[in-house]
Amino acid sequence: MGKPLWRRAVDEVDRRVSGPVEAGAHSDLFNDLVTLQWRLARGAQREVERRSRRFLHAVNLPTATDVRRLSEQVASLQRQVRDLEDRRP
Amino acid sequence: MSPSLAPADLLSRVERDVQRAVRRSRNGLRYAAGTTRPKVGRTPKDVVWRRHKAELWRYRSDSRRYRPPLVIVHSLVSRSYVLDLYPGNSAVEFLLREGLDVFLLDWGVPDEADAGNTLEYYVDDSIPAAVAAACEVAGTDDVNLLGYCFGGVLSLLCAARHPELPIRNLAAMATPVDFSQMETITALIRDGRLEPDDVVEPTGNVPPDVIENGFKLLKPTAEVTQYATLWENLWNDEFVEGYQAMGQWARDHIPFPGAAFAQTVEGLVRRNGLVEGTFELGGETVDLKKITRPVLNIMAERDHIVPLAAAEPLLDLVGAEEKDELRLAAGHAGLVAGRKAAKVTLPGIAGWFKEHSDADS
């Protein structure tokens, strides 16, 4: 028994659409747009953090940057413990 | 005009369709509610070596008939349970049944503490230590090494930098060596649109969603056709189990340690260092010609993540006299999971290792 009609229709649409969609997603223009979107999102995130920092510190709350610094310090400690473990005979 | 059906045939077809509709509804509800998540990676195993987050597992077996043991080196960007999906659909289970002594080197899930892990950390420290541990546990003088995906790159680099390591045979599965052929997935970083630091998150690692989205962009419409295939086979319990397990794995990426990522981008992607012979580790150029043990290159013809052209040049790059290749009509994960893997890929891989190993008398 062959494929049902609906499935043949889906495959046909996919056959016609996937080529152009893939070509679009792999084009320079698309890559430039993704890069732009990436940079804008990063920039917006930094700006939100910068603006919220003063308020959060005023009410004695840690900011994302504070938490990040702390986790970097913890990670650094973990790495030192590892190094010590590795040096153990 | 279609031929008319006998009443008995018509009745049995209606009965079958009703049964399928019931099963489709039941499986659809379970799938939507997420109540039947597949239990993956269930083959019994023991942790025989551990270093930081990396673990070496030895799978239990009563039928080990070949030596040396097979050590599988997994990739840095995905979960290793793709090699042991679920009973009846597990590469590990198959290899054990074939009499091989199977070890798997799993890297764990990196966090901030692993952000500084360089490729040297894996290639010069972890893999050699895991190989030594496997020899000790199995009571052998050497091992067979099988690298999957980026684990294949790590295995090749390790074998090239440490010719003294007791590796009898080396196999690379779905392993990219010519990174110029991976244009699509590397486009954003190859041409400098993004620098490695742009992609790295505050933990110092490349977040898993970046890797997942990179893979999705390779075939943007694939998800739609996959859902259509699921709907078509939703009545089939076995299919749904496999679909869920593979779907779970495909969405279950892990962070890529930032330092190793930066080296990969600079040395492998931008300079195509393995093909050009310019890739440096630990201040020395890596020469794949130093790999003189028998090498097997296992490639998937329909692999959209590591295209054939990216994996193909391996045998020209290594110095081994005895080199073989297996080309299989499968996709990236289809090499190790699914019906085709059990019928074609895995027997080919197991056969090659068995031919190149000693059978217990």
Image: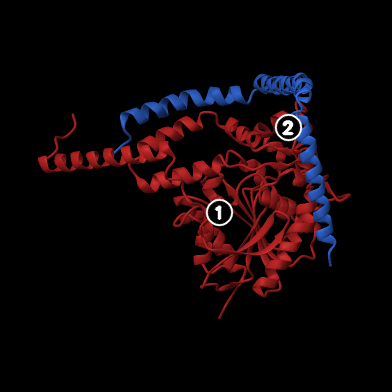
Instruction: Tell me where residue B147 sits by quadrant.
Output: bottom right
Q: Nearer the viewer, residue B296 or A65?
A: A65
Q: Name chain B's colour.
A: red
- Residue under the point 50% across and 44% down: B246
Residue B311 falls left or right of residue B161: left
Seen from this angle, which residue lies furthest left? B7
Q: Colour of chain A?
A: blue
Residue farthest toward the bottom in the current orientation of the protein: B361
Q: Is residue B113 above or below residue B129?
A: above
State the separation of the CA atoms marked 1 and 2: 28 Å
Image coordinates of residue B26 in percent, x first then y, are: 32, 40
Quarter of the image for residue A11 reads: top left
Q: Nearer the viewer, residue B322 or B287?
A: B287
Q: Residue at x 83, y 55 (%)?
A: A83
The image's colour scheme reads: by chain
Which residue type carries mark 2? Val
**Relative image position of residue B299 (x, y in whole percent):** 59, 49
**Residue position marked by numbered label 2 in the rendering:** B199
Quadrant that contains the C terminus of chain B: bottom right
Q: Residue furthest right?
A: B283
Q: Which residue is mark 1?
A: B83
Which tag, 1 or 2, sits closer to the chain's start? 1
Mark identifier at residue A62: none
In this orientation, which residue lies closer to the viewer: A48 or B280?
A48
In the visual, does B43 lie left or right of B109? left
Few, some or many residues within 10 Å of mark 2 (<14, 14–19, 20+):
some
